[in-house]
Image (tube, rainbow, N blue to C red):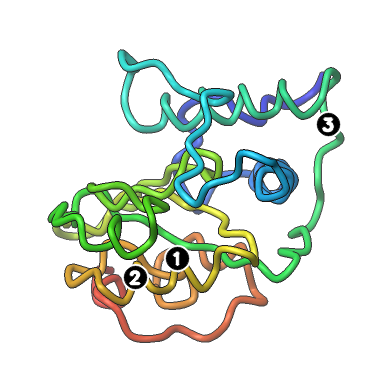
């Protein structure tokens, strides 16, 4: 039986199966790289193709709903599970910490809406939602992992530079557990999440 790639409650970065995570990422890469070629492309993305329900059962539910819709739009039959990390095609992985957000709108303005007023990247880019346990419940214990295609890396970077609370960072700038699934990422840089765990 085919494993459910977008099954809810796969939020522990230590226990999510590699093939599930890498298949989610492969689908996200395929989708976002197709989006940037659309005639109606705009940096804000957020097309109605993947619009999630307003009334959902939490962050993980919303992200899995988007992922399942994307999977259905990409493939009429289930995809084969991806066993190793797919080629990022010049793109990068980023992390959004929703509980660390001050929603000042600076990143939204800087990126033509790629990040919204709450610093959330477009749902087209979402790979998964994760929660980590720590001795103290902190603002950097839960996060959204997203893929930024190469054509938008510079734009996303400009938004991160004007984000004073550092709730949006490149994965390589963090010390979060999901990094262990991506061994080719650059070494840990500086950022608020470095001290979160």
* Number of residues whose C-alpha sits closer than 10 Å to that of mark 1, classed few (under 14), some (14–19) or many (20 or more): many
Secondary structure beneath dot 2 equals helix
Q: Residue at x 56, y 67 (%)?
A: 180
Q: Earlier in the sequence, mark 2 or mark 3?
A: 3
| Cβ–Cβ under 8 Å for marks 1 and 3 | no
Residue 94 - label: none
* Number of residues whose C-alpha sits closer than 10 Å to that of mark 2, classed few (under 14), some (14–19) or many (20 or more): many
Residue 169: x and y in percent read 38, 68
Q: Is residue 122 above or below residue 162?
A: above
- The image quadrant of residue 57 is top left
Q: Which residue is the site of mark 2?
A: 160
Structural distance between the alpha carbons of marks 1 and 2: 6 Å
Q: Residue at x 45, y 40 (%)?
A: 11
Structural distance between the alpha carbons of marks 1 and 3: 29 Å
Residue 156 - label: 1
| Cβ–Cβ under 8 Å for marks 1 and 2 | yes
* Number of residues whose C-alpha sits closer than 10 Å to that of mark 3, classed few (under 14), some (14–19) or many (20 or more): some
Q: Residue at x 38, y 61 (%)?
A: 111
Residue 25: x and y in percent read 66, 49
- The image quadrant of residue 71 is top right
Structural distance between the alpha carbons of marks 2 and 3: 33 Å
Horizontal side, residue 67 vs residue 129: left or right = right
Q: Is residue 44 above or below residue 169?
A: above
Q: Which residue is the site of mark 3?
A: 79
């Amino acid at each position: 039986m085919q494993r459910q790639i977008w099954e809810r409650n796969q939020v522990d970065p230590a226990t999510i199966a590699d093939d599930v995570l890498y298949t989610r990422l492969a689908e996200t890469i395929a989708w976002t790289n197709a989006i940037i070629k659309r005639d109606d492309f705009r940096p804000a993305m957020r097309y109605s193709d993947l619009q999630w329900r307003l009334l959902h059962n939490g962050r993980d539910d919303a992200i899995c709903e988007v992922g399942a819709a994307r999977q259905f739009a990409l493939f009429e039959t289930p995809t084969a599970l991806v066993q190793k990390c797919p080629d990022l095609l010049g793109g990068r992985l980023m992390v959004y910490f929703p509980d660390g957000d001050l929603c000042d709108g600076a990143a939204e303005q800087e990126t033509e809406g790629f990040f919204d007023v709450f610093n959330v990247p477009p749902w087209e880019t979402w790979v998964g939602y994760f929660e980590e346990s720590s001795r103290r419940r902190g603002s950097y214990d839960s996060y959204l992992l997203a893929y930024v295609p190469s054509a938008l890396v510079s734009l996303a970077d400009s938004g991160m530079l004007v984000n004073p609370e550092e709730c949006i960072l490149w994965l390589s700038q963090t010390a979060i557990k999901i990094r262990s699934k991506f061994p080719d990422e650059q070494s840990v840089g500086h950022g608020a999440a470095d001290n979160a765990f």
